[in-house]
Image (tube, rainbow, N blue to C red):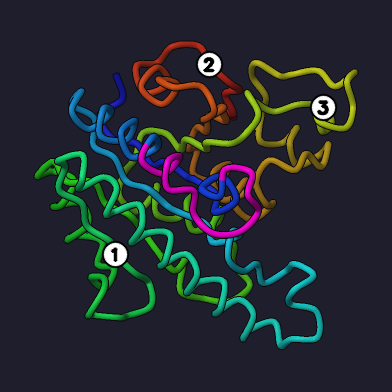
Amino acid sequence: MYKRVLLKISGEALAAGRGFGVDAVFIHQVAKEIADIARAGCQVAVVVGGGNFFRGVAEQAIGMDRVAADHMGMLSTVINAIALQDAIEKDGLPTRVMSAIEMHEVAEPYIRRRAIRHLEKGRVVIFAAGTGNPYFSTDTAASLRAMEIGAEVLLKATSVDGIYSADPKKDPAATRYETISYMEILRLGLKVMDTTAVSLCKDNNLPMIIFSMRERGNMLRVVQKEELGTLVTA
């Protein structure tokens, strides 16, 4: 079993197909799976996206200043982080939200050493507000935080069961990769994570696993090193 992991969950995933907002039933299912990982002895940090409320690069941001739009996107991740914190704590596990944008009333400021200490004490740590900087996605924030806290692997939970040669929802002939290198992702232009996040993982040799969060128990299986999804390495 991995000793410490960083889990990336998109905001769209928390909407569970509704397109907007948080699906209360699904977020409790996700929270239970995260709690199961922590109880199994793995230290868990989470980075959440905010696409279920606002995406700085989506159509809803057309005509807006990019910096302002990105800040709105970062604030939407805080909403998701608080919702996920509440769901995990209802499952009986202590949880901390750490925000890259300071807002003391609802979250702790992100301090690397404090985050590591929380993990060592068995708390789930949820990183919100991305990197705190515009022009950087939550994928990049996940790569950055994973390396800062010394995670063994970056786990990206999605709606599909790995990386495909094309969008499997649109192209039935798309084939799934069991393993793939960072360079192949960049060369083929696969839309797994943004290029900055992939390059960051490549430069620091951080393995990634892309897997489906739709099937219950998948998170624990991945943490227990079962062959699931697509492994990305050098």
Looking at the rendered structure, the kind of residue marked 2 is Leu
Name the side, left or right, on which 120 lies relative to 185. left
The answer to which of marks 3 and 2 sits earlier in the sequence is 3
Mark 1–mark 2 CB contact (< 8 Å): no
- Examine the rendered structure and indicate whether residue 11 appears above or below residue 174: below
Quadrant (top left, top right, bottom left, bottom right) of the N terminus: top left
CA distance for labels 1 and 3: 36 Å
Magenta segment, which residues?
Answer: 16-28
Magenta stretch: dominant secondary structure? loop
The spot of residue 43 in percent (x, y) is 23, 37
CA distance for labels 3 and 2: 17 Å
SS for dot 2? loop
Which residue is labeled 2 in the image?
228
The spot of residue 160 in percent (x, y) is 65, 29
Q: Which mark is residue 98?
A: 1
Is residue 175 magenta-colored?
A: no
Is residue 24 magenta-colored?
A: yes
Q: Which mark is residue 165?
A: 3
Looking at the rendered structure, the kind of residue marked 1 is Met
Residue 183 image-quadrant placement = top right
